[in-house]
Image: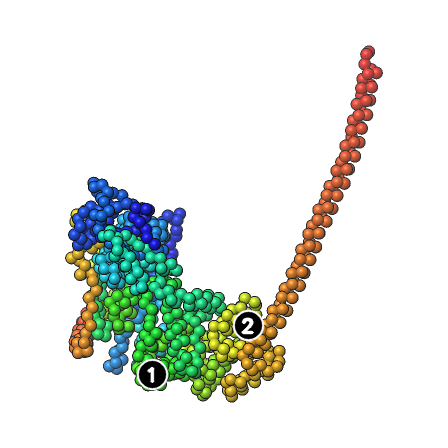
């Protein structure tokens, strides 16, 4: 989807249409739907160029594989469709090229594995590959759970997507969903923190070095925790409670907002 | 192969302390080295004020790198590096400069050499370097590919090397490995198998292009004991060929590893179940019995031929010159294969058509499809491919394939269609193809020869036709040339004629002028002196 032109072969194309800044243009999809007390949460990457029929097929298959109620099919389909459409709505905008290094963070729990990590990622590097990074991470850390890799890749993709949207829509008013704002606690000031790696390499002694200061090494190292079954259960119970409280809080907020907007 | 330092300046050795070219941030490397001496060596620009020190004072360690990485030089950047990691050298970015590249490179290599025995992981290194992790990974992969880091030689070689070096004086030198000349790869044992593997992949990629996998074929014999060894052999072959092709070093799986805790019976049941139920993992797990749904899925995707299934989505999309009749045959052929290989006889031939729309098709049927199309084309190089393929697979599969091919050729005759359908439902093994050549062919060889006869005949007629076409065209061309020449000649004749006429006119004019002149001068003369 590159819409740039080449100038005399010395410059790269000046602009690129909005897309995921990774080697493969796959968008992160998060599903969180509820029906009659059953809650289905899932995350995966999706190719936004797939046809709508594919979405329905996928939803049907998911419901069948996980033995969910049939009513979930339209819910899932709608959710995927909405997110794909949102991506589509950005597609006409131009992305800035150039090196923009962000500090991506990982803080997730997959079954019994907790990972916390920080690393620098260049948003302008369109050859980046979250899946490869995740795969390498799991291999190096010798993680056995095969679900960790995709979860890490997804977390990276999600952050990249948010950052890309922010960078492209700074002029445009964006409605980031309430859920995302609350749950992910994304630091919006991150967009101003996009620097070139050159600046990151600068040191106080006015010399630059590509090697990080020793005291920062631990900061950028991945921390992995493997929980026992009891810990996992306890954690999950706590998360459920928190989620319920939050939901109640959100409902109250919505009511409040609606009341006020109606009164106007 | 020993390279002496004094000899050529390009020796890639590494002093234990920091290199003294490059940034002066030696302390930044954090290398806890006691030697504070200012090292210099041949091949490096001496930056320090000291002159070259005697060799005995050098505290150099020996590091092994493979011989194909002999171009590496500590202080310089080689064109290979420029090409592979172009981002550092195109000047677009302040943070991607050759200097930065050198820093990355030297840091990673030094880090590895702190403890050459262990495998340096990327995750360990990336926390210590500033920069985009994707870029760092690229540098890391590059160094690993060329054996400059994580180069672990097999133990016999190691012993040989260590014995020779122990005898040396404290001064040790870089040895470049000459063992793995074939390329980055650890295990030379499987190299013989790999050319075969690679050529299979070449062959299969030349085919209809439907199969994206490059796995060798795995006939599923009903004989269970054969199954595991052949699969493991080919799995290790595949795994060995991957490093050779991809250039990364992977540990070869032991023959038991890929099975995990799955017994052969369980694997067979799994495959049976998949053949029967398709992607319905609930029923598959129920059929296997001892394994959970998740285990079944994981096992299935780990199986060596799993790749082939990804490419088989949309099986009936198969355009050949034989038309739609081919689609009919594919499920029938598959049905028959199931009969022979799995041993379950209650497959519905028609129902299997929908069934094969899903992803799980046992690898034999996909094998048939690429083989059918060559027969439809019936041209010579493809025939060689077929011969190669039939040599690769077992005789049974080749026989079935030949039978399928014969069916394809005979599809013009609607009678044979019905016969085949009936046959497939009744018996699996004794199939009588009634093709144009006639005769009853039972054994695989005879079938193959019958098929080859048909193919040859077809080829001959095509060749004859081609020849005739060529002659015709040639005659046309010659005729046209003649016509061209003829028209040219006519043209020239016309020109000649015109010129002759002009000549005669000019002569006339000339004589006229002459006459006038004579008269005029005569008149002038006669009336002259007066």
The answer to whether residue B523 is above or below residue B426 is above
Front-most of A87 and B120? B120
The answer to whether residue A215 is above or below residue A36 is above
Q: Residue at the spot x=39%, y=76% of the render?
A: B229
Q: Chain of mark 2?
A: B
Q: Position of residue B386 (x, y in %)?
A: 52, 71
Give how far apart the Cα atoms at labels 1 and 2 are. Answer: 39 Å
Can you tell which mark lies on residue B285?
1
The answer to whether residue A147 is above or below residue B17 is below
| Image side of residue B506 versus residue B283, left or right | right
Query: Which residue is labeled 2 in the image?
Result: B375
Asked which secondary structure carries label 2, the reply is helix
Q: Residue at the spot x=23%, y=61% of the render?
A: B124
Residues indicated by labels 1 and 2 sit on the same polypeptide chain? yes
Quadrant where the image shows the C terminus of chain B? top right
Q: Position of residue B128 (x, y in %)?
A: 21, 57
Q: Chain of mark 1?
A: B
């Amino acid at each position: 989807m590159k819409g740039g032109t080449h100038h005399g072969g010395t410059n790269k194309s000046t602009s690129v249409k909005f897309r995921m800044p990774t080697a493969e243009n796959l968008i992160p999809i998060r599903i969180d739907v509820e029906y009659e007390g059953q809650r289905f949460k899932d995350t995966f990457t999706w190719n936004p160029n797939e046809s709508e029929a594919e979405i329905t097929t996928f939803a049907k298959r998911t419901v069948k594989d996980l033995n969910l109620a049939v009513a979930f099919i339209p819910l899932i389909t709608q959710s995927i469709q909405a997110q794909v459409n949102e991506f589509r709505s950005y597609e006409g905008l131009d992305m800035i090229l150039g090196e923009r290094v962000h500090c991506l963070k990982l803080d997730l729990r997959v079954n019994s594995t907790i990972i916390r990590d920080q690393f620098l990622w260049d948003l302008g590097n369109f050859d980046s590959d979250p899946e490869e990074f995740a795969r390498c991470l799991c291999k190096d850390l010798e993680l056995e759970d095969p679900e960790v890799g995709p979860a890490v890749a997804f977390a990276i993709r999600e952050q990249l997507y948010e950052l890309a949207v922010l960078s492209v829509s700074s002029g445009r008013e964006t409605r980031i969903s309430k859920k995302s704002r609350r749950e992910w606690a994304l630091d919006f000031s991150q967009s101003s923190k996009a620097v070139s790696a050159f600046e990151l390499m600068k040191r106080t002694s006015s010399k630059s070095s590509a090697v990080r200061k020793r005291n920062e090494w631990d900061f950028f190292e991945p921390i992995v925790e493997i929980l026992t079954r009891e810990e996992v259960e306890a954690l999950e119970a706590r998360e459920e409670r928190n989620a319920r409280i939050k939901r109640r809080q959100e409902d109250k907020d919505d009511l409040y907002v609606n009341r006020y907007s109606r009164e106007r | 192969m020993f390279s002496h330092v004094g000899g050529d300046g390009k020796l890639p050795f590494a002093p234990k302390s920091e290199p003294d070219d490059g940034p002066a941030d030696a302390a930044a490397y954090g290398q806890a080295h006691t030697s504070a001496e200012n090292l210099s060596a041949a091949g490096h620009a001496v930056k320090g004020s000291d002159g070259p020190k005697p060799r005995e004072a050098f505290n150099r360690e020996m590091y092994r790198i493979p011989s194909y990485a002999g171009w590496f030089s500590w202080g310089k950047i080689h064109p290979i590096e420029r090409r592979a990691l172009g981002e550092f050298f195109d000047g677009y970015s302040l943070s991607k400069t050759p200097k930065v590249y050198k820093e990355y490179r030297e840091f990673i290599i030094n880090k590895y050499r702190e403890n050459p025995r262990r495998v340096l992981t990327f995750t360990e290194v990336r926390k210590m370097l500033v920069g985009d992790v994707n870029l760092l990974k690229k540098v890391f992969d590059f160094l690993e590919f060329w054996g400059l880091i994580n180069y672990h030689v097999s133990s016999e070689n190691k012993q040989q090397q260590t014995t020779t070096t122990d005898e040396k004086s404290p001064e040790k030198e870089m040895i470049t490995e000459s063992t793995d000349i074939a390329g980055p790869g650890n295990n030379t044992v499987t190299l013989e198998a790999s050319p075969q593997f690679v050529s299979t992949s070449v062959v299969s990629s030349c085919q209809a292009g439907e199969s994206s996998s490059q796995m060798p074929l795995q006939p599923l014999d009903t004989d269970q004991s054969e199954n595991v060894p052949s699969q493991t052999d080919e799995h290790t072959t595949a795994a060995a060929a991957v490093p050779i092709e991809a250039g990364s070093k992977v540990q070869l799986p032991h023959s038991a590893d890929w099975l995990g805790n799955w017994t052969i019976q369980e694997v067979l049941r799994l495959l049976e179940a998949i053949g029967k139920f398709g992607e319905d993992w609930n029923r598959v797990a129920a059929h296997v019995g001892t394994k959970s749904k998740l285990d079944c899925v994981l096992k299935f995707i780990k199986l060596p031929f799993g790749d082939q299934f990804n490419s088989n989505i949309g099986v009936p999309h198969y355009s050949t010159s034989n038309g739609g009749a081919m689609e009919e045959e594919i499920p029938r052929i598959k049905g028959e294969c199931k009969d022979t290989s799995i041993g379950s006889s209650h497959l519905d031939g028609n129902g299997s058509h929908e069934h094969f729309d899903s992803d799980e098709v046992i690898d034999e049927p996909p094998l048939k499809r690429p083989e059918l199309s060559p027969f439809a084309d019936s041209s010579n190089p493809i025939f060689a491919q077929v011969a190669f393929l039939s040599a690769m697979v077992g005789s049974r599969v080749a026989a079935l394939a030949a039978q399928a091919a014969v069916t394809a050729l005979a599809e013009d005759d609607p009678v044979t269609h019905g016969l085949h359908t009936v046959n497939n439902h009744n018996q699996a093994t004794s199939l009588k193809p009634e093709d144009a050549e006639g005769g009853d062919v039972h054994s695989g060889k005879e079938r193959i020869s019958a098929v080859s006869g048909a193919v040859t005949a077809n080829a001959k007629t095509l060749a004859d036709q081609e020849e005739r076409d060529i002659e015709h065209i040639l005659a046309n061309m010659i005729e046209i040339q003649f016509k061209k020449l003829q028209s040219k000649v006519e043209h020239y004749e016309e020109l000649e004629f015109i010129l002759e006429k002009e000549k005669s006119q000019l002569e006339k004019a000339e004589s006229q002028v002459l006459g006038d002149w004579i008269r005029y001068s005569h008149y002038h003369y006669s009336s002259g002196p007066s």
